[in-house]
Image: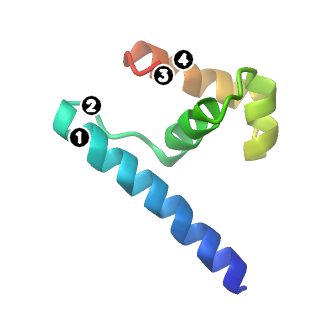
Amino acid sequence: MQLISLMMKRMYWLHDGLQAALEPNGVVPLTRAQVFVIANIAAGETKASAIARNLGVSRQAISQIIGELTDAGIL
């Protein structure tokens, strides 16, 4: 259980840190899902199917999030 708790704290740390960096630059708040997609892209993932597999969601869900990030001018 300790490992899961540590992983959750790190996920929140990533999300909160990215939000804190984006907010002063006028970027609207991102969902955790959007942050995790950005983290995968930053790590070098280029295919929606690979990101979906990493996050345990459908490729369609990732495609929708990528579309949202693109429309917002983030990607």
Query: What residue is drawn where x is 61% and y is 76%?
Result: 6
Query: Picture quarter containing residue 2?
Result: bottom right
Residue 44 at x, y = what percent? Answer: 68, 29
**What residue sits right under mark 1 in the picture?**
23
What kind of residue is marked 4?
Gly
Whether residue 56 is visible to the viewer of this picture, yes or no, is yes
Q: Residues within 10 Å of mark 3 (few under 14, many from 20)?
A: some
**What residue sits right under mark 4 in the picture?**
67
Q: Which callout, 2 or 4, points at the residue further toward the start of the chain?
A: 2
Q: Are marks 1 and 2 in contact (CB under 8 Å)?
A: yes
Is residue 1 rendered to the left or right of residue 24? Answer: right
Q: Report helix, strand or loop for mark 2.
A: loop
What kind of residue is marked 3?
Glu
**What residue sits right under mark 3 in the picture?**
68
Q: Report helix, strand or loop for mark 1.
A: helix
* Label ID, residue 53: none
Label 3 to label 4: alpha-carbon separation: 4 Å
